[in-house]
Image (cartoon, rainbow, N blue to C red):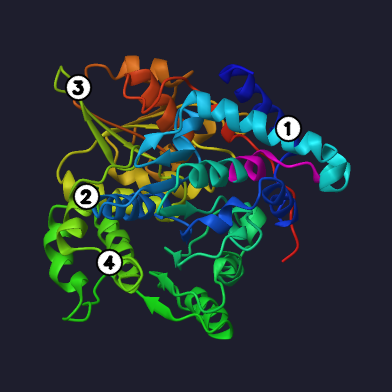
Amino acid sequence: MTYPEAIQFLYGLRLFGAKFGLENTFKLATLADNPQEKLRFIHVAGTNGKGSTCAMLENIYRAAGLRVGLFTSPHLVSFRERIQVNRQLISENEVTHLVEELCELQNAAGGAPALGRRDACPTFFEFVTVMALKYFAGQKCDLVIWETGLGGRLDATNIVTPLASVITNIAFDHQQWLGDTLEQIATEKAGIIKPGVPVITATDAPDALAVIAKVAGGKNAPLTTVAADANPPPTSKISAVLPRATATLALAGDHQKLNAAVALATVEILQPKIPVSEAAIHTGLTSVSWPGRLQLIQQPDGQTILLDGAHNAAGASALRAALEKEFAGTRPIIIFGALADKKWLEICTILAPVAAQVFTVPVASERTAAADELAQAFHTASPGLAAAAAANLAEALNTCNDKPFILITGSLYLVGEALERLGFSPAGAGERGLNEWTAPQFQR
């Protein structure tokens, strides 16, 4: 099998959509000799900030000298972004080897019937989850930063028992699968809480926090809440490091300071098991990188391009706050694209007041929202705003090539396409189509 053949096999697994539940993942992991039992995890769920928090945790523990695995999704450009060790992407050869090995294990066990019914074949995410576990175990990682895919309770990543369960926040997103209320969404996210395992959250919505507290209490899982205006205990390393580190935090935006506080609270709680020095914490926060989240690119001609995957209302609000603070007095030309199943009308309404002009584009996805409808939404939100639909991102960028400040936002799919087109791709080949999936409603 070649790498392109391995990727094509993974594309084929998309035909099974996404099935919520842990049975298939446990069965496949069992065939792979349960690699999750050989690893230590920090499991991270939440609506926004999961990836950034994971990146901070990874950078802190790597600065402390640990060999750290990082599992995140979706990828921006290359599938290999999803599975990293010490921020080195898994190699094409390793991807190929793992696909072959897991296929052989399934075949030796009798193929699909060995995993149950025909419709119990592993989905793309289930298969990739076990690939990652097997890779991290083979790489002898000291710790794995483990991000959920969707929700938590029935997410394939939930077969692990972590050292700590992190729930960054609860906001509205993926309502068609997670529920229409914050309580329902919190119930799904709180599904990662394990008996006796500490829980850390920055959730501030009272109804959602009440759900998390109830689940944590029922499982005797110590709960730590982190607030933007809260001061940590004066004896903690957080107290010593947080003011200095967040003042020079490598990730822009005030919302990242809260994510940093969540990461630091997690590090503090795990100090008895994984000691980390103040110097490692400071280094980890001040040197962290996470593409596509308020990522600033300075072009040789002086043009500034800001990339941010604000794909829900809470993310758009954080982006707007960052624009108003970090770029006060400057309005960007916004290039915007969104998926049709997102609350794009709300996002357009939030961003319209800070735009000088808007070009809307289709996202390279079968689920894209229509560019003309997006343009109309911006115009409705701000009638004096010039908003026009472009045929694609390339056309929009070409139209704006002499403009000083451009913001590309709305969907991580669009941000990934922009990184690839601008030559700032974090990996070699575009495999964004692997992010596509459909999911049935599941039972709460």
Question: Which tag, 1 or 3, sits closer to the chain's start?
Answer: 1
Visible in this render: residue 341?
Answer: no
Distance between the alpha carbons at the discs numbered 4 and 1: 40 Å
Labelled pair 2, 1 in contact (Cβ < 8 Å): no
Question: Dot 4, crowdedness within 10 Å: few (<14), some or many (≥20)?
Answer: few
Q: Amino acid at mark 4?
A: Pro
Q: Which residue lies under the disc numbered 2?
A: 324
Q: Is residue 46 above or below residue 377?
A: below
Real-space Cα distance between discs 3 and 4? 41 Å
101 in relation to 36, above or below: above
| Type of secondary structure dominating the magenta stretch | helix
What's the residue at 17%, 47% (across, down)?
326
Q: CA distance from mark 1 to mark 3?
A: 47 Å
SS at circle 1: helix
Looking at numbered disc 3 in the image, what kind of residue is underneath it? Gln
The amino acid at mark 1 is Glu
Between label 1 and label 3, give the one nearer the viewer: 1
Residue segment shown in magenta? 120-129
Q: Are marks 2 and 4 in contact (CB under 8 Å)?
A: no
Q: Residue 101: x, y in percent?
A: 66, 33
Q: Dividing the image into 4 quarters, which one contains the N terminus?
A: top right
Residue 197 x, y percent position in the rendering? 49, 74
